[in-house]
Amino acid sequence: MRQYEHGGNIYEHPNCVDFSANLNPLGMPAAARDALRTCADACEAYPDPQCRELTSALATFEHVPRKWVLPCAGATDAFARICLALRPTNALVCDPCYSGYEQALELVGARLTHHALQKEEDFAVTERVVEELRESVDIVFVANPNNPTGRCVPRDVLEQLLERAKVQGATVVLDECFIDLTSHKGSNDLLQRFSNLVIVKALTKSFCLAGLRVGYALCSDARLLSNLRKAGQPWAVSVPAQLAGVAALADKTYLQRSRGTIARERTHLMRELQSLGLYVVPGEANYLLFEADAGMYDRLLCQGILARPCNNFCELDMRWLRVAIRTAPQNDLLVRALRKVTQ
């Protein structure tokens, strides 16, 4: 069985600055920290299996009805539930992409069709992905923005994909885990028109709650959402995760401040990488993908910088690295390390 690797392995590299996990550089919201400090007594009881408070908070945050929201133990849990509930036989994915899609599809033995995004087009998602949606495909995974490229899906392409999938009876799983850290709006307004759309998001990245595993699915199809609920464990979202999630969502300025910081630092970091002669994908999220050489990962590691090697993404190899956008001092540390190892 294929080994699936992800960023954030600070346990093997405890003395490095971690650029491998794409988390909000502002860190966990203060309100969420306070909720965690005071939740010990609440942990004596089972978690609310319906996640009532968290569901209400998410519905308000996303401007959708409560009945369209299903909290999960992170986005990866949501992807697994979708595959277990739908039991797809043929899937379409855009490469390179998050390996969690393939990992979930592997649970049900689905066959994969790989749509390769092109470096010559800066890995843009184009209308060609719609052409790849043949009648045999019953589920499509697409990310907005894509991980690891950071490219967002043009709205017209997304709507064409949804229209064609609807006609063919296919489900579109739209991963928008990073959308709230970009300047783009999410795709919630499409849920009413397309009952075959499932949007997956997580507080993991946007609110820096990676250790708590708080994700959710949005869908207007009541039957499908009910099946997703049945496909997972009854107490999947823990008491601390629910409380911290509700507290984080109550901070009305956090994401706005985050987007400002990320946009400024991404522009700065991209220019610095390009000044070193590196090809950088013009991503729009809180991370950048760039092409260097096969030894760059190890050289940065020796400088105390943990990047994300991209050799386990389809279409990429060890020449490609992904780095998170962090605070200005940390990003400057990365730039100094890169200058040193590229001389």
Image: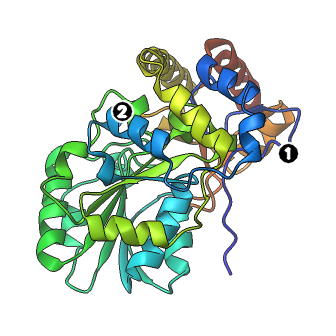
Cα–Cα gap, marks 2 and 1: 33 Å
Which picture quadrant has residue 183? top left
Left or right: residue 263 compared with residue 132: right
Left or right: residue 137 compared with residue 242: left
* The N terminus lies in quadrant: bottom right
Instruction: Name the residue type under label 2.
Output: Phe
Q: Nearer the viewer, residue 249 or 55?
A: 55
Q: Nearer the viewer, residue 274 or 15?
A: 15
What x and y, as percent, mark residue 162?
A: 18, 62
As drawn, 198 above or below 16? below
Mark nearest the camera among 2 and 1 is 2
Mark 1 residue element: loop
Which picture quadrant has residue 135? bottom left
Kindly identify the residue that appears in the image at 69 percent across and 28 percent down. 338
Mark 2 residue element: helix
Kindly identify the residue that appears in the image at 26 percent across and 42 percent down. 64
Left or right: residue 9 compared with residue 167: right
What x and y, as percent, mark residue 319?
A: 62, 50
Numbered label attached to residue 124: none
Q: How packed is label 2: few (under 14 Cα within 10 Å), some, or many (20 or more)?
A: few
- State how many labels appear: 2
Kindly identify the residue that appears in the image at 66 percent across and 26 percent down. 35
Residue 26 visible here: no
Q: Which of pointers 2 and 1 lies earlier in the amino acid sequence?
A: 1
Question: Which residue is under mark 2?
Answer: 61
What x and y, as percent, mark residue 217?
A: 40, 54
What x and y, as percent, mark residue 126?
A: 23, 55
Instruction: Name the residue type under label 1.
Output: Tyr
Residue 151 visible here: yes
* The C terminus lies in quadrant: top right
Question: Which residue is under mark 1?
Answer: 11
